[in-house]
Image: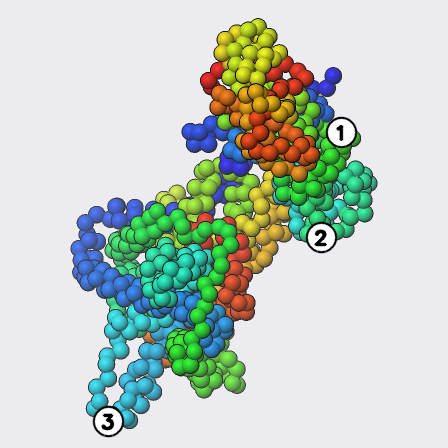
Amino acid sequence: MSPAAVMLTGVSKLFGRTPAVDGVDLVVAAGELVALVGPSGCGKSTLLLLVAGLLEPDAGTVAVDGQVVAGPGSWVPPEQRRVGVVFQDAALFPHLRVADNVAFGLPRGAERSARVAELLELVDLPGLGRRYPHELSGGQQQRVALARALAPRPSVVLFDEAFGNLDSSLRTSVREATAAALRASGAAGVFVTHDQTEALAVGERVAVMHAGRLEHVAEPAEAFHAPATRFSATLLGEADFLPGTQDGSLVTTEVGTLAATPAGSGPVDVMLRPHEVDFSADPAGGAVVERREFRGASYVYVLRLASGACLRSVQPHTADVPLGTLVRPVVAAGHPVRTFPAGG
Amino acid sequence: MRSRPGRRSSAVLVSGSVLLVLVPVAAVVLGVLTAGAAPWRRVADTGWPTLLGTTLGLLALTLLGTLVLGAGLAWLTTAYRFPGRRSLQWLLVLPTAVPGYVLGLVWSSLLSYPGPVQTGWRALLGQDAPFPPVQTLPVAAAVLTLTLYPYVYLLARIAFRDTAATPYGAARTLGLRPLAAARRIVLPLARPALAAGGLLVCLEVLSDFATVQYFGVDTLSVGIYRVWRGQFDRPAASLLALLVLLLALVLLAAERWLRRGARYSSPRGSSTPVAAVQLSGWRGWAACGACTAVLAVAVGVPLVTLGLWSTTTPLQGPGGSLDPAFLAAAANSVLLAGQAAGVVVVLSLLLVHAARVDGRRRIALGVQATVSGYAVPGPVLAIGALLALAAARELLDALGLPGGGPLVTGSVVVLVVVYAARFLALGYTTTEARLASVSPSLTAAALSLGVRPRSVLTRVHLPLARSGVAVAAVLVAVDALKELPIVLLLRPFGFDTLSVRVWQLTADSRYEMAGLPALAIVLVAMVPVVLLFRGGDDAQVDEEAVPGLPAVEDERHDVVLAGVAR
């Protein structure tokens, strides 16, 4: 088994007295794609720069490909780390042609042009080697940046909001192409993003970062359905919290008794996502349609419960329910719902 | 990318360039501390309180003049449309190409008793018509104002355009007339820029001891020159130099205070330019006339006069060839300017590179310290260098090593080193401004690709900063060509440059002879102004001159502009 592509142990970085990264532990396996997601200012980009060697940690150890590159008494400069970086602005060298950009990190030699051709093939841009960066579209620039980062065969490539500058229509295709190219190359990937859709789509695991700390590291489905914290819950998707009383693995709420996780007892808040909530017209249902928001393919209805709490419910765009309709909400999660200690 | 570890070479480089500025300053301070009481008495004999008073008076008058003229012209060309505005707005930078000691030479000759002005005056009003005295402080201040106002003009224009345009528009929609909006909105917003421009003007005035002597005005810097060249009184000279240095520090502090909390000096993002008001009829022509008059006095008349002198004086060489003394001086000037530009450009590029590759706090601080060397007046640097060299000689002699003699009698190498200290800020900021428009992620990308920092310099930073390096080289070379105080104090015996020759010939009242070297200086100095500022409409003029300006910290961008303005 090959060593972890990246291993962070207790990594911290202070800016002045403020910890930007605060005791982070994270292991990225060889060839694994991990999405690092968090709001702006949570320290995720700082963490990435620490791995790349563009910043020095104040505490903790960074290891790349089994070798300690930063830690007490050891330091490997960025140019010797075999860590590729793809930046949001692509950061292509404007004075060099595409082929020279890709070849930038390669030693001089005969295989150079073959490797460049192979990489341009990999990112699906064959034959564009003689262009200059400004002659390419934003999506093409990002793919060249990826090819350039992959050229020296790094064990991991870091993406710093790499798709953030692209149109939303383009973003998906570039993202898919990037993930495919990464898998083909065998390099691990760490995607820093503030976009939860991107994080869930691209990561084999998702790491949720908040105020310099990792709150949850899990597979996307688990992170989404069973988030570790309320913060993770709202970061990864829309969520409402409904008070309830838990008894073992059952929780009783205003909208019925539901299977719950983790087991526990006492007052809790139940996390419900809009797609888990359905409703039907019922004058005695205990809720009223208060607002709705059109999202193209769907409507999101806001239901006001008798207690005053609100639940959101996603309905197909064909479900045209007038405001003020009295309804009965039904939870259809298909899995135990996540509960958090009440309050909080 | 704030802290980036471990690059020994950049630390060495930055410490070296800090020493370039620090050693002369320290030498002056030490010189005073170790001098004892005797020089105080000798300095008292020079009447330093009078010198100080004169210096303060000259500073105040010149500051007032440049602020009124610079800000006024900047507002006129920004907020109003009138005939010739497009050309005038860049031509008004041109007076910067005429050094004070040249403008002073021209006007002190033209206004002298046998000069054309007084001759005409007498022809008009009779032989005994009294003519106001020319050799006065106000006239010296006027001459300095005319060559230094472009500092204020350029900075004010940028402030008006970037900072004040939108609030000005808002004030107009709220019912203020243009002048009222200018007074209540634009002027307060431009205060930091005006303070910065004023500071640069004051530092130049402090450095000057040539121009003012034409007009019999004795400032502290004149005092330094006298006690040094006349009496070789080292301790007294260092005492006066310290006084000048303290004055510079006070001015620096005053500028800081004036822009306290004024972080709004360079906002990011787009701002709409001030919608210029059309001046119709006679008003338009009056505006055009005012600008033209300034240009005529500051550039036109000097050019014509120097041209006439150059062509009518018999060329002193055998068989009608050029004066060999002129040729020798020109060769020395080119040599000195070229070497200074070379050293400064290489150092600047290395410093910019070091600051990019190595983000450690002390590197940034060191660069900052080096850049702030622009605040040390030229005579202070020169005296400091001389004192340091004298100390080095004593050390060499004490150790029984040869080579001490040439150190103190001065050599071109010493001149180049002091020039480097003087112009490093200019070179650095110009280069840095170019590279500032290049995203830092480019540097990071290059490093992450496994390329050594040295290769990042040659493969990424140098190609991308090339235009900035070229601009820096031209600016430094021209500044070095124009420089007078340092070369007067430090030149080896018999080493004349064009500027020294202008000065000496003027001191001997051989004005016509000074025409050719002065004309050469002015024409060369006009090259960068024309290259950098000509063409383009309002929005472009200044941006082209200083690539990537918005990204530059306001402090530095003042220096860039200072450099451009010189």
Q: CA distance from mark 1 to mark 3?
A: 98 Å
In this rendering, the answer to whether A161 lies above or below B321 is above
Please give the name of the residue rendered at 33% of the width and 64% of the height, measured from the top-left corner. B180
Mark number, residue A135: 2
Residue drawn at 36 percent across, 66 percent down: B177
Horizontal side of B17 relative to B257 (left or right) equals: right
Give how far across and how far down residue B168 sits, in percent.
40, 60
Q: Could you tell me how far apart the alpha carbons at marks 1 and 2 are, in whole angstroms?
A: 28 Å
Q: Are marks 1 and 2 in contact (CB under 8 Å)?
A: no
Q: Position of residue A231 (x, y in %)?
A: 53, 24
User: On the image, numbered disc 3 is attached to which residue?
Assistant: B126
Q: Which residue is mark 1?
A: A183
Q: Residue at x 46, y 70 (%)?
A: B89
Amino acid beneath label 3: Gly
Which of the two marks, 1 or 3, is nearer to us in this view?
Answer: 1
The answer to whether any part of residue B446 appears in the image is no
Q: Across the whole image, how many numbered discs are drawn on residues?
A: 3
Please identify the quarter of the rendering in which residue A262 is found: top right
Q: Amino acid at mark 1?
A: Arg
Rate crowding at label 2 as few (under 14), some (14 to 19) or many (20 or more) other CA atoms within 10 Å: few
Chain for disc number 3: B
Closer to us: B62 or A281: A281
